[in-house]
Amino acid sequence: SARVALCKISENERVATNEVIIQVNNALTDQDNRVRECACEALDKMGERAATNEVIIELVSALGDPDYSVRERACEILGKMGEKAVTNEVINKLLSALEHHDCRVKQSAYVVLGKMGEKAATKEVITKLVSALEHQDHRVRECACKALDQMGEKAATHEVTTKLLTVLGDQIYSIRVSACVLLDKIGDKSATNEMIIQLVSALEHHDEWFRQSACEALG
């Protein structure tokens, strides 16, 4: 069966010829979710040899797979590929995934963009991440905050700082702390009077860890 064949491939990465990679890549669109998951596993085991443009594009499409395990594996593989997976086409596919109706697909796209780091930090991507900081789903907000953190200096913009200041009032504790940590990293490059006032105010917060994060951001 297709599953058995794919499992054998995943057990022996030396069989990763161009022809085999193409066949495994095609299996990512199989009707059987178990076959699609096995295809992901096989591509993962093949490592860098499987990092072709065709495979990367199909993996990005798999972020919208109806099966959670397939989405998770595709996200994991793209994350491992990191900067190697960055092309204009891939970025555009990920930007489309950010508009998906399923928040779990959005989360996967944010995670992948974060793993791609500064190379994925286009103006459009940064704008999308900033917008996501006010998404109604806290998991999306948290993923967006982490992705901005992974984009380094390119995230040190006035737009990002302004939005992070509002995130300091987020209902979710971990997001507030992430915002403080990120402000600490980019503060020297984007410090404003408003930012300092907000962080000083945060020093009065009842939570010790939050106060500590604000103190570090003030530096």
Image: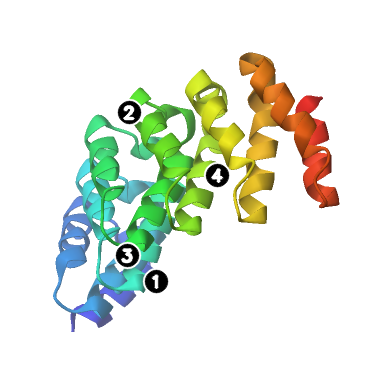
Marks 1/2: CA–CA distance: 40 Å
Residue at horizontal 27%, vertical 49%? 97
Residue at horizontal 31%, vertical 50%? 50
Q: Which residue type does callout 3 highlight?
A: Cys
Q: Quadrant of residue 179?
A: top right
Give residue 118's mark: none
Which badge, 4 or 3, is on the more N-terminal residue?
3
Give residue 146's mark: 4
Q: Nearer the viewer, mark 1 or mark 2?
A: 2
Q: Which residue type does callout 4 highlight?
A: Lys
Which badge, 4 or 2, is on the more N-terminal residue?
2
Which residue position is annotated with label 1? 11
Q: Nearer the viewer, residue 208 or 204?
A: 204
Q: Quadrant of residue 22?
A: bottom left
Which residue position is annotated with label 3? 40
Q: Nearer the viewer, mark 4 or mark 3?
A: 4
Residue 89 relative to residue 142: left or right: left
Label pair 3/1, CB-CB below 8 angstroms: no
Marks 4/2: CA–CA distance: 17 Å
Q: Nearer the viewer, mark 3 or mark 1?
A: 3
Packing grade of label 3 (10 A; few <14, some 14-19, many >=20) is: many
Q: Nearer the viewer, mark 1 or mark 4?
A: 4
Percent x, y for residue 21?
23, 56
Packing grade of label 1 (10 A; few <14, some 14-19, many >=20) is: few
Give residue 124's mark: 2
Percent x, y for residue 30?
15, 71
Marks 4/3: CA–CA distance: 25 Å
Label pair 1/4, CB-CB below 8 angstroms: no
Which badge, 1 or 4, is on the more N-terminal residue?
1
Q: Is residue 193 visible?
A: yes
Q: Is residue 122 above or below residue 116?
A: above
